[in-house]
Image (cartoon, rainbow, N blue to C red):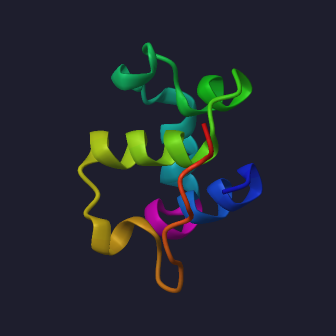
Amino acid sequence: MKEREFWQLLEEVLGRSYGRSLARDQVLTALDDMTVVEALAAGVEPRVVWNVLCDQLQVPDSKRWGKDHNAPPLPAK
């Protein structure tokens, strides 16, 4: 997942205003208490950030990837 795709999915699943607000304000405990914006700036893979955010917000898998999206592959380690 590219960062551009992350932002598109965030807006689709959570709504533009709410999603952008969460990205700035929601602390992600699984990512050393960084926000979404901080985690992406620190180089954390967008797919990892997305999964952590969805897990923390308890977004079910059925809604996590939006209407017409398939889950992107895990990043190579």
Q: Position of residue 51 (x, y in %)?
A: 42, 47
Which residue occupies 47% across, 75% down?
A: 66
Residue furthest out toward the top: 32
Q: How many marks?
A: 0
Residue 30, located in which quarter of the rendered image? top left
Q: Position of residue 47 (x, y in %)?
A: 56, 49
Instruction: State left or right for residue 51 relative to residue 72.
Output: left
35 is higher (above) or lower (below) than 5: above
Residue 28, located in which quarter of the rendered image? top left
21 is higher (above) or lower (below) than 19: above
Please tell me whether residue 25 belongs to the stretch shown in magenta: no
Nearest the viewer among 44 and 53 is: 44
Residue furthest out toward the front: 77
| Predominant SS along the magenta part | helix
Residue furthest out toward the bottom: 68
19 is higher (above) or lower (below) than 70: above
Instruction: State left or right for residue 14 relative to residue 42.
Output: left
Instruction: State left or right for residue 76 relative to residue 74.
Output: right
User: In what quadrant of the picture does the N terminus appear?
Assistant: bottom right
Which residue occupies 35% across, 21% down?
A: 29
Q: Position of residue 77 (x, y in %)?
A: 60, 36
Which residue occupies 56% across, 54% down?
A: 17
Nearest the viewer among 11 and 30 is: 30
Q: Position of residue 55 (x, y in %)?
A: 30, 45
Please provide the residue range marked out in magenta: 11-15
77 is higher (above) or lower (below) than 67: above
